[in-house]
Each structure stands twice: as C-alpha cells, then as structure tokens.
Image: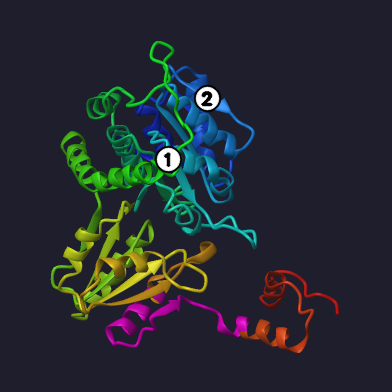
Amino acid sequence: MLRQIEGSQAVAQAVALCRPEVICAYPISPQTHIVEALSRLVKRGELKPCEFVNVESEFAAMSVAIGASAAGARAYTATASQGLLYMSEAVYNAAGLGLPIVMTVANRAIGAPINIWNDHSDSMSHRDSGWIQLYARTNQEAADLHCQAFRIAEELSVPVMVCMDGFVLTHAVERVDLPSQEQVDAFLPSYEPRQVLDPAEPVSIGAMVGPDAFTEVRYLAHLKHLQAIEAIPDIADRFAETFGRDSGGLIHPYRTEDADTIVIALGSVLGTICDTVDVLRETNARIGALGITSYRPFPADAIRSVLAHAKQVVVVEKAFSVGVGGIVSTDVQMALSGTAVRVHTIIAGLGGRAITKTSLHNAFTDALADALEPVSFLDLNRSLIDRELQRMLATRRSGPHAENMLADVGAIAPRIR
C-alpha cells in the first residue's frame, strides 16, 4: 500500500510486519521515532505477541536483545552514533554468539566535537564486528531491507545491521509502498532458531573458548559472511518475486556499461550522485555510478566485475580513517588488486554537511580531467583551517579547535583574550 510517510515510521511499520517478539529500546536521535512508533503498536495491541522493553542504556538494549534471541525470540533494536559505541561490547558479543538480531542504525556522526547530523562514522566503526551491514539508498529500500534482514539473519544465524542515513532518510517524508502482513508472512518464515536455551535440552551459550578452538570459532563467523555473499542476492530475488520490486542485494550499478570513470558510494548520497552522472552524460562524459548495499560482507567479486573495464574509480565516503584516508576505498582497492584501475577518495558530508550536485559536478569533472587528488575533502574550508594553524603557531595555549573555528565562522562569540 502506497503511503506518504516519514522514513522512521515506514521502518517501524516494516519491522512490525516481521513480527518481532522482543523489542529493546533506548532513545537517541535520529532513531527515536522508530522505537516510539513500535512502542505505540505494542501498547495498542496491534503488535503481539511482543514485549517492548524500555532499558536504561544502549548497552542494556543490546544485552536484552542477546538474552531474548538466545531464549528463542525474534529480537530487534535500533540505535545511532554514541549509542552504538556505548553498546559496542554487546554488539561484538551478539556476532560472536551467532545470534540473528536485527538492528537499525540511523547513521549519525560520532563526537567529539558533539554533532547530531548524518555521516557514516558510527556504523563504519563497527564494520569488523561480525555484523552484516546493509545500507539503504531510499526510505523504500530502508523498509524493504528490514524484511530481508530478518530472513538473512535467521537463515545464517548472524546479526544484521540495516543502516539508513539519519535525518536525510529517517525524518524525510516521501512515498513508500508498505507491504501487507500476508506478503511478509509469505516471505519471512516463522523463526526457528539454530541455537536456543531450552530447559529440556540444557546447553551453554557463550562458553569460555581457549586457544585450542578460538581461531576455528572465529573462522566460522567469517564463513557465514562468505555464505551471505550468496544468500543476500538470492533473498533479494525472492523478495522481488513476492513484492514485485527490486530492492536489496549486493550492489546497484548505474550507467556503468561503457563508463571509464565509476563513482562508488553507500546510502542516500547515491541519488545526488546519479543525478550528477546524468548531467555529465549529457556532455558525453563516460561516467557511471555503483551503489554498494552490502558493505559487510564486502562483495569484492561483484564489484571487480562491474569495474573491470573502468580506468578510474572515485569513492565518495561519509567517514574516513584518520591518518589514512578512505575506508570503503581501501576495500575497493583490495577488490581491484592486480588491475591498473586508479582509485580516488572523496571524503564528503561529514557531520551533515550538504553534498550538492554542484560540488560533486566539480569533483567529478576534475576526475575526468585527471586532476583529482588521491584523497580529497569535498568543500573543505581551507582558510578556516589556516587560521587555526596560525593560532597554534602563535601561542602554545591556542585553545580548543572546535570553539575557535565556531568563533571564526560567527557561530559563537570569540573568546576574550
């Protein structure tokens, strides 16, 4: 059913249709609307049987989800930014235990300095936690990916993180085709856990593992992700058969067939990138785009296949590795190992800075002219940085960078010296 709906509300409706039995919630912007909507459904009796647990922290949310999943319940939670960091220990535990929990991450910058706007630094910080990571391009895909996430998680017994851009998607109101309960029931089987705490069949979950078996346990976690490379597109195909639309999968190429330059990105920025590609195509530029939906597991073979004929790749990233540069681009370079394809990194949109078609057009034009730096920061205000560097040279006690720069741009009053 087509509805004009906020992204968070669409995700809440999609999650409810998946019949979770335990929802653990702690509010943090910009995911709060998701769990608020789910709490109302539980309170009104529209989502049952389901226990909605108000917990005291994000660490508790994931801990309750772990307990619920181990006891045989379909478990769900949501978080963002500092909340994901706070539950970090439990996030790793959930993956290490192989529990099929589904979690929404409403992507938001990590402080300090404090920032509540969107980038991918939160989920990227947990890329090696053992969770599958799926990135939504639109609110339609965000809703669809949750239906697929429960199936992926339960077929492989591995947790799945659905990442959607905070505010850009979570608070955007647009048309979303929400499925019926009958469609979701036909697509998502009843939960049959591979491991469960059952008094009739006593077993320990989370036992101490020494050097004699730890490597093998960790290898099995790796093997599940390798299996997910096959399972994710298969489940996306089944989703398309049931719901009549293509959503999810590993990657989404756009005008790449004859492209010499291909732009790679994750999440909602792909809409702006594809629009920019269309504009450049009108000038006969041979440029295309490649969206990565499954970042973990990383679909190296699929990406290499699409990029086989490209001369250069531009990776637009909403997070970066301090002192190194790109995160996604490092994986792309691995996928292209042994080829002559050049890889450039553009760091963009940090802390919610707008990524405009004009800025992307300029950057892609530089790439087409072989004038793009290996690593660049889109719309970087160099004069602002230079002023701060001069302060640092002028005096030892130059003060905190963030406050100094805010004063420079007129956001706060300058310090009295």
Residue type for callout 1 = Gly
Total number of numbered labels?
Answer: 2
- Looking at the image, which is closer to me, 218 or 140? 218
Q: Quadrant of residue 376?
A: bottom left
> Magenta stretch?
359-385
Residue 167 is left or right of residue 58, and the answer is left
Residue 340 is left or right of residue 88, and the answer is left
Label 2 residue SS: strand
Dot 1 surroundings within 10 Å: few (below 14), some, or many (20 or more)? some
Query: Looking at the picture, how far across and down is residue 204, in whole percent?
Result: 45, 25
Q: Which residue is mark 2?
A: 52
Quadrant of image for the N terminus? top left
Mark found first going from the N terminus, 2 or 1: 2
Alpha-carbon span between mark 2 and mark 1: 25 Å
Q: Is residue 104 magenta?
A: no
| Scheme of image coloration | rainbow
Residue at image coords 46%, 46% = 105
Residue at image coords 18%, 80% = 284
- Looking at the image, which is closer to me, 268 or 334? 334
Point out which mark residue 96 bears.
1
Query: Looking at the picture, how far across and down is residue 210, in whole percent?
Result: 46, 40
Q: Is residue 24 visible?
A: yes
